[in-house]
Image (cartoon, helix red, strand yellow):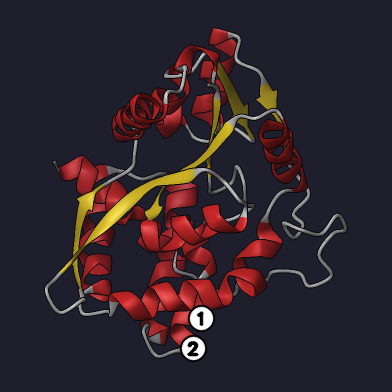
Amino acid sequence: MRAAFFDLDKTVIAQSSVVALGPELHARGLLRRSTLIYAALAQVVFLRFGASEDRLTQVTERVLKITRGWDHDEIRALVRETMNTIVEPLIYAEARDLLARHQAAGDQTWLVSMAPAEVVEPFAELLKMTGAISSRARIDENGKFTGEMDFIAQGSNKALAMREVAAAHGIDLAESFAYSDSETDIPMLEVVGHPYAVNPDRGLSRTARERGWPTLSFTHPVRAHDGNRSRTPFVISAFVLGALALIGRGQARRR
């Protein structure tokens, strides 16, 4: 059995899945305006100067406090309610078509993302994928987020989880495919026999050239079940939640 493993952010969709939910979290009173402004500024700093250990630690410690006390069921419901209007229009047409080809060929298809399960699993269901590998937030006995993570689906952890999935589902990794945009996902790409760099960052682009990995360019976001370009452009204002996507990365660096 073959499988195709897809990273989510900037591989299947054109933006960070967690960033996309920021304005809705603010609208529902879960995030203060000052927090969103801080997150927006942090995102600019990371894009411009990179994610140094000090910056990651500083941002992570502040952002972890944000999720503490959030109701798990409420967040899951929010994601499912807003999936079609907020996140679905960001899907790359090229990724949708590639996924459809794998599914038509009888391949299992798995979504693999550092984003939390509350975001990743509904997205995998939307795309009719076999399953998902994602980060898992810690939930207390009252169903509230503690602000900590039980599992971080990043780097070597992604590769480990993919091997576990392969063993459980009879997948031949040597015959399988993986797609990602990020240098941090090199371990994920190394696990399979057919790795592809999609819209690669500088580090992954360099590695792909050195190892002869094919590179793909995805540029056209559309709705998952619509062949036409979305008429409703997705606009992320200054109030974005980019820092939340760095929670797991910051914790992983400190461990």
Residue at x-position 32% and y-position 34%: 161
**On the rendered structure, is 199 left or right of 175?**
right
Q: Can residue 127 be seen?
A: yes
Q: Where is residue 101 shown, x and y percent of the image?
A: 74, 33
Q: Nearer the viewer, residue 58 or 233?
A: 233
Q: Is residue 239 visible?
A: no
Q: Is residue 12 above or below residue 71?
A: above
The circle on residue 24 is 1
Q: How many tags in the picture?
A: 2
Place of residue 105 in the rendered image (x, y in percent of width and height, measured from the top left) = 70, 28
Disc 2 + disc 1, Cβ < 8 Å: yes
* Relative to 211, 72 lies left or right: left
Element on which disc 1 rests? helix
Give the amino acid type for the residue marked by disc 1 in the picture.
Glu
Quarter of the image for the C terminus: give it.
top left
Q: Residue at x 54, y 20 (%)?
A: 176
Mark 2 Cα shell of 10 Å, populated few (<14), some (14-19), many (≥20):
few
What's the mark number on residue 27?
2
* Residue type highlighted by circle 2: Ala
For disc 1, the neighbor class at 10 Å (few under 14, some 14 to 19, many from 20) is some
Q: CA distance from mark 2 to mark 1?
A: 5 Å
